[in-house]
Image (spheres, helix red, strand yellow):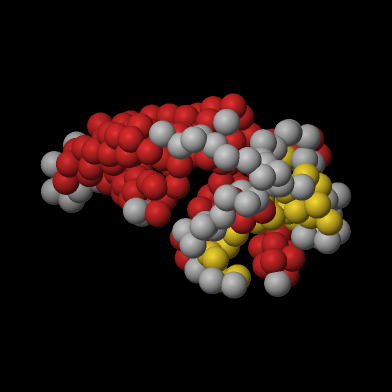
Amino acid sequence: ALYDIAKEFFETLKLDPNTRMLDVTLTGSLATYNWSDYSDADLHILIDFNLLKEREMAEDYFKQKIQNWNRTHQILIKGFEVEIYIQDSNEPHHANGIYSVMDDRWIKEPSRYRQEIDYDTVQKKAASLMAQIDDVYESYAEKDYQIALKTAENLIERIKKYRRSGLSTKGVNSVENLVFKILRRNDYIKKLISLKILAYDHSMSVNGA
């Protein structure tokens, strides 16, 4: 079922025939011993980004397609929501467990370990970022569209780099990744992306006389 989901999504990208789906992997907490009822089925589609003619443009295109798919679909596998991601096959992926859905084998078998989680820091950082996202909404509500847009763009990039830093150093149970999961679970990531789009649309609109 996971492979079918990935294949159908990949076909919607309508890429050059030379750009193939090299693998489909299940990663994240569901591929480890640290899963919970709140875990997502992180489904990664691997392609060779070096084959893309306009790499930067293609990456932006992928982001929009992924965001749209994750926003408009709620497919459950054994009760866990599927989240799709397109991964460059040339870049390392930091995870405790990686399972090839395409080849039906472990690429990296998870190991059992106990990691102390700083819940207090996670809660404080998540609360801080949620407050900043709420501030973006206030700017938008006050029709300060340019400020809302710029702040939203900066926050999105900061959160991406923040999460990436945590994954590369301490993995899925890092403070940074757990903060991101709280923001996503509380729909604050979706709220921030929506505010960015709305602020952009309003800033580019021209009112009638």
On screen, residue 75 versus residue 45, left or right, reads left
Q: Residue at x 31, y 47 (%)?
A: 195
Mark yes or no: residue 16 visible.
no
Q: Nearer the viewer, residue 78 or 3?
A: 78
Q: Nearer the viewer, residue 70 or 58?
A: 70
Say how many tags the image has. Answer: 0
Residue 59 horizontal/vertical position (percent): 62, 40
On screen, residue 90 versus residue 36, left or right, reads right
Q: Quadrant of residue 30?
A: bottom right
Mark yes or no: residue 98 visible.
yes
Q: Residue at x 74, y 65 (%)?
A: 3
Which corner quadrant holds the N terminus? Answer: bottom right
Q: Is 209 located above or below residue 144 in the figure?
A: below
On screen, residue 172 versus residue 201, left or right, reads right
Q: Residue at x 35, y 32 (%)?
A: 121
Q: Quadrant of residue 168?
A: top right
Residue 188 horizontal/vertical position (percent): 34, 49
Residue 80 horizontal/vertical position (percent): 54, 66
Residue 79 horizontal/vertical position (percent): 54, 71
Q: Is 171 located above or below residue 100 in the figure?
A: above
Q: Is 12 located above or below residue 59 in the figure?
A: below
Q: Nearer the viewer, residue 66 or 206?
A: 66
Q: Is 20 located above or below residue 164 in the figure?
A: below
Q: Residue at x 39, y 47 (%)?
A: 182
On screen, residue 125 versus residue 36, left or right, reads left
